Amino acid sequence: MYLGLDLGTSGVKALLIDESQRIIGSANASLPVSRPHPGWSEQDPADWVRATEAALDALKASHPAALAGVRGIGLSGHMHGATLIGADDQVLRPCILWNDTRSWKEAADLDANPAFRALSGNIVFPGFTAPKLVWVARNEPEIFAKVAKVLLPKDYLRLWLSGEHLSEMSDSAGTSWLDVAGRCWSKTLLDASGMREDQMPGLVEGTAVAGRLRHALAARWGMGEGVVIAGGAGDNAASACGMGTVAEGRAFVSLGTSGVLFAANASYLPKPESAVHTFCHALPETWHQMGVVLSATDALNWFSGVTGMDAAALSAELRDTLKAPTSVTFLPYLSGERTPHNDAAIRGSFTGLGHESARVVMTQAVFEGVAFALKDNLEALKSAGTALSRVTAIGGGSRSRYWLSAMATALGLPIDLPQDGDFGAAFGAARLGLVAATGADPLAVFTPPETAETIEPVAALLPAYEAAYQRYRALYPALKGLSTL
């Protein structure tokens, strides 16, 4: 048996597979997010441990024999988080999360140094880890002075599980400290942000062994000795392993809390000025590119809170047949935006509202706004040398047929839906655990699922969607100066 642990922003998922990759069982535990100030987003790492314990306790209750048979564990987690650890391995402050934009000034300062784009292959985004540490140095110097290690969220779970200070390439590529072409920490970038290499975890590939489960924890859940913990992956690379998006030309669109358009690459193809992320993949000598929208289902969940209707009910009001865009346009920049704008200060908006703009019209605009934001990502990927002919949809938002139809029409690409099953980050993490424990060929393990259905663009609405997209594009520069942090 093999176990995948996915540390998401809103919860931890534990998933068990057998040697034939058949899903045996899964369990979830929720997580809170703290937003003490505008633009801030934090979590207490102790909550990650409690949620992981709860998920594994639930698996032990439902599948004790299968859990006892675990030989390998893979880890996945939300990226860019700054988990600050003291010399005694104690957490120094709440983890600053990926969607926290407080360090936008520090990010701009670092990005002005050309070494960052040259070596990391990326813009220094406010959500990345390096500017967060510069912010801590400037605003919490007493904490900064105590930092012995900076760990990414899933790697804090590794520390708890195994006692090891280790990370892997795909997650570390999102720190702004990694030489992404060389797949190693860059002394130049660390020096430029006031950090030392001894404050970084050791690095392995995602498919390699990166620790073994502590005896006490193995005993708690009835596992044997020597359970291997794989290097694992950042959540998007882990999802790609689950989806089999590891070969050149394969891509997926993820409609989760954030939105991601992800493409696998056989070579390193940076183009930081496009705001496309170019990161290491979880497999050795592979890379990937992705565009990131900070609010995807988060935008719908926000609108759900405003209207008092749950997201499923809002989607149901639209039914399944795609409609032409109305005069109402929604910009989903609720916490700033990454690709293509790299703008932490911009905020969301509805424009074109009239007396006739009922709730269902605004819901439609939210769906379209996220679809157009991902269309921006597609155009950025094209500019960086990646052309796509189709994508596979994953994430909670992919349960909405209307949203998928809007997405396919906005992108002008067919969207494949995988057969029933769970092919997300937890499944990818479990696959990584299998490879690390058995030494299996990753390409033989990370196969794509069968396609159950394909959602085609609605040809009759392509002109209307293109016109609405051009209106959407014109709004960002018009509103840019009106948003302030």
Image (cartoon, rainbow, N blue to C red):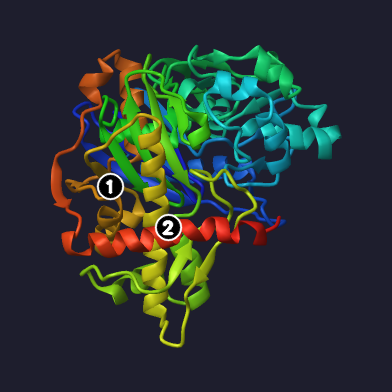
Q: Looking at this rendering, what residue extends furthest in the right direction?
A: 142
Disc 1: CA contacts within 10 A as few (<14), some (14-19) or many (>=20): many
Q: Earlier in the sequence, mark 2 or mark 1?
A: 2
Residue in the foreground of this view, choosing between 211 and 155: 155
Residue for point 24% across, 39% down:
23
Amino acid of disc 2: Thr
Q: In this rendering, is residue 102 above or below 193?
A: below
| Rendered location of residue 464, percent (x, y) | 28, 65
Question: On the picture, is 364 further left or further right than 341?
Answer: left
Amino acid of disc 1: Ala
| Rendered location of residue 449, percent (x, y) | 18, 37
Q: Residue 280, located in which quarter of the rendered image?
A: top left
Residue for point 39% across, 55% down:
372
| Rendered location of residue 383, percent (x, y) | 39, 34
Q: Circle 2 — which element?
A: helix
Residue 328 in sight in this render? yes
- Which labelled disc corresponds to residue 133? none
- Which labelled disc corresponds to residue 393? 1
Where is mark 2, residue-wise?
Answer: 297
Disc 2: CA contacts within 10 A as few (<14), some (14-19) or many (>=20): many
Instruction: Indicate the quadrant containing the C terminus: top left, top right, bottom left or bottom right.
Output: bottom right
Instruction: Indicate the quadrant containing the N terminus: top left, top right, bottom left or bottom right.
Output: top left
Residue 65 in sight in this render? no
Q: In this rendering, is residue 319 above or below 418?
A: below
| Rendered location of residue 3, percent (x, y) | 36, 32
Q: Circle 1 — which element?
A: strand
Q: Looking at this rendering, what residue extends furthest in the bottom direction?
A: 355
Residue for point 72% across, 56% down:
37
| Circle count | 2
Question: On the picture, is 427 further left or further right than 83?
Answer: left
